[in-house]
Image (cartoon, coloured by chain):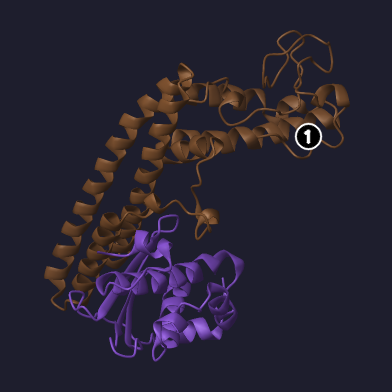
Amino acid sequence: MTMSNAANIPQSATAAATVCWSCSASLKESALFCEQCGKIQPPSGGYFSVFGLEPRLNLDLGMLEHQFHKLSRKLHPDRFGRASEQEKEWSLASSSLLNDAYRTLKDPISRTRHLLRMHGAEIGEEFAGKDKKDPSRAPADLLEEVFELNMQLEELRMGDEDAGLKQSLSEARKKFVALQDEVDDQLRAEWAKWDEGAEFGNDAAREAAQKTMVALLDRRRYLSNLVREVTETLGDS
Amino acid sequence: MAYSDKVVDHYNNPRNVGTLDKSSAEVGTGLVGAPECGDVMRLQIRVNPETQVIEEAKFKTFGCGSAIASSSLATEWIKGRKIEDALEIKNTDIVKELSLPPVKIHCSVLAEDAIRAAIGDWKKKNGVAETAPVAVATAAN
């Protein structure tokens, strides 16, 4: 993910930013700062590389948080009071990238969605109703199940005895949450396979895990909709 | 986002909500879904075996207003048509009629898929040669 506001960045700095614009020392990939002179560099990284992380699904969340705080401090506007306009601009852009990246990566589902999308998975509403849709994305048995669960939910809502209704809805929510947890466990099992495939360049293994995860994320979307609807009906959280 | 008056009308007064007997040979059922947004749509038709006219159409949709309106409109349009004519209905016709915004076009696609799936299911049940192979994949049983 490259930043688009690179128009007024000196040419030498944008070209994959391999050397520092200030002292010409060579830079690590996606480095926010030069290790030699400490100057801020134009933002060039993606969500993982901004933290200096390999793109993997299993993340050390403690390390992620630590890096986030450390980098946030280094990018704090107070530190750029006397810097050039260009450097101020870079620090703001990097801050915003860092915040987006942290928010996306710390949540396991959004992290999975992000990484799989980077690898070509068609997840998200902009892909809904696409012409050449993979028929395995909407397996009949899953649709049957989701439809049935929705019907049950509707019946429960139409029931008139209040106490009983609330009870049944709470139970329904428990059931949906349990199903969702099951999906999450299955996702985690696939993370390991995907990461291993990425680690050892085993594309077949990585793609197989990716396909399974896309199906699991689809299932999860239906379930989280159900959970949300029950919660709305119950009127609490 | 503001829905068009027609969407609101179909949403508030959905036509042909309900269920037909799935096991009947005259009934075709299409169950389709959009995993990206979590919508599910079931559309059923009862076809006169002599005339191949769709005499009854019912739907049940769990999803947003546009998905409900698209399927409601679809049942209205296919009722009274011969199945081959019903297959002529394109999602773009639904988009136009309901003035769906670009982000909701997939709801109309879902409705078109549901029509095809229901007809495909009926054809399969009745041993009619399948002309729309896509429909088989999404047809329920």
Q: Secondary structure at mark 1?
A: helix
Instruction: Tell me where residue A26 sits by quadrant.
Output: top right
| Residue A236 vertical position relative to residue A67 in the rendered view, above or below | below
| Residue A36 vertical position relative to residue A49 in the rendered view, above or below | above
* Chain designation of label 1: A
* Left or right of B57 in this view: A26: right
Q: Which chain is brown?
A: A
The residue at 24%/53% (across/down) is A176
Residue A3: percent from the left, percent from the top?
A: 72, 36
The residue at 39%/59% (across/down) is B38
Tag 1 residue: A89
Q: Quadrant of the N terminus of chain B?
A: bottom right
Residue B104: percent from the left, percent from the top?
A: 54, 67
Instruction: Tell me where residue B31 sits by quadrant.
Output: bottom left
Q: Specify the amino acid type for callout 1.
A: Glu
* Left or right of B64 in this view: A181: left
